[in-house]
């Protein structure tokens, strides 16, 4: 689970396995596999970094790749 912040400054924990897509339009919108969505204060890259860090801590073999 990763901790994120709703637009009203309320922190919450999200099961990262439920994330289908993340977009910045301009707010960061996370669409879940249930087709529900959540808008958060963190940027798309911050959310991705949190997922990667969580998975590293829990033995997930994943790395951040930045295309520049």
Image: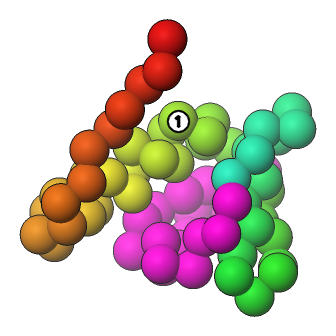
| Residue placed under numbered mark 1 in the picture | 45
Q: What secondary structure is marked by label 1?
A: helix
Tell me what residue is drawn at x 42 percent, y 65 percent.
Answer: 2
Please tell me which residue is depicted at 37% across the width and 32% down the height of the picture: 65
Nearest the viewer among 28 and 19 is 19
> Residue at (39%, 74%) from the top-left corner?
1
Q: Which residues are magenta?
A: 1-21
- Does 23 sit left or right of 14 as displayed? right
Examine the image and state in which quarter residue 35 appears.
Answer: bottom right
Residue 66 placement (x, y as % from top left)? 43, 25
**Residue 6 visible, this orientation:** no
Residue drawn at 60 percent across, 70 percent down: 19
Picture coordinates of residue 17 (x, y %)?
A: 47, 78
Q: Position of residue 11 (x, y in %)?
A: 57, 62
Residue extending farthest to the front is 67
Q: For residue 37, which quarter of the picture?
A: bottom right
Q: Nearer the viewer, residue 48 or 38?
A: 48
């Amino acid at each position: 689970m990763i901790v994120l912040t709703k637009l009203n400054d309320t922190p919450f924990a999200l099961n990262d396995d439920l994330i289908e897509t993340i977009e910045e339009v301009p707010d960061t919108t996370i669409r879940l596999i249930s087709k529900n969505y959540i808008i958060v204060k963190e940027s798309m890259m911050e959310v991705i970094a949190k997922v990667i860090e969580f998975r590293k801590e829990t033995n997930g073999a994943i790395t951040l790749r930045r295309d520049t």
